[in-house]
Image (cartoon, rainbow, N blue to C red):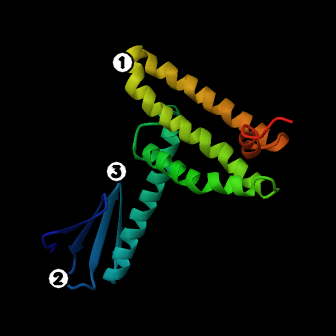
Amino acid sequence: PLSKPSSRCVSNRAVVLRRTGPDSSAASLESSAICCGCAFLSKTSNRTALYTMALRSVARAMAQARSAAPARRNLSSIIDADSGKLATQGYHYTSMALIPLTPLAFVLSPSSYCLPVDLALGVVIPLHAHIGMNYVMTDYVKKFVGKAAVGPSRYIMLGATGITMAGLLKLNLSGPGVTESVKSLWRKKE
């Protein structure tokens, strides 16, 4: 005879434990885990093994959810770069990266050690500008141009960011580099 089921919820997955023997001892536990419409039953004599099995299935489901979620939002998150927690974190991380990279680039500038720093700046500066300009577009394009212009302006910004990255990459690989180009603005013409 079955006693009243004892339900245990483990992070979005229901694991129901029932006592199945006449003695209702821990030696005869039956577990059923229900996930996404499919159910499985397994008998185990060890409560630890039961919980381990449930936690592994939860970990698998969470890993699948994590791997599936970014694939759905990749293009929209690039175009709509100012929405969500990830965009805000990206903006802050690029700010934090620029703090040490900029002075380091100026210190290392006449040497070949500056190339990796210039390449990093060639990626970080356009990303930082792209996310920041999306914040500006969200606030001001609606007010001055209209709500319908926000989408096209985001695509234009994405194109400008791509062209900027390509130009800085070309400047770093076949030209003097970002740092030397900026330093040349303050050098006397000979």
| Residue 41: % across, % down | 34, 66
Give the CA distance from mark 1 to mark 3.
48 Å
Type of residue at label 2? Pro
For marks 2 and 3, the one nearer the N-term is 2
- Crowdedness near tag 3: few (<14), some (14–19) or many (≥20) residues, C-alpha within 10 Å: few
76 left or right, relative to 45: right
Camera sees residue 77: no
- Which residue is rendered at x = 21% and y = 80% of the image? 21
User: Where is mark 2, residue-wise?
Assistant: 22
For marks 2 and 1, the one nearer the N-term is 2
For marks 1 and 3, the one nearer the N-term is 3
Camera sees residue 6: yes
Q: Tell me the SS state at disc 2.
A: loop
- Which residue is rendered at x = 34% and y = 76% of the image? 50
User: Where is mark 3, residue-wise?
Assistant: 37
- With respect to residue 30, does 106 lie above or below? above
The quarter of the displayed image where residue 178 is located: top right
- Which residue is rendered at x = 55% and y = 37% of the image? 129
Give the CA distance from mark 2 to mark 1.
73 Å
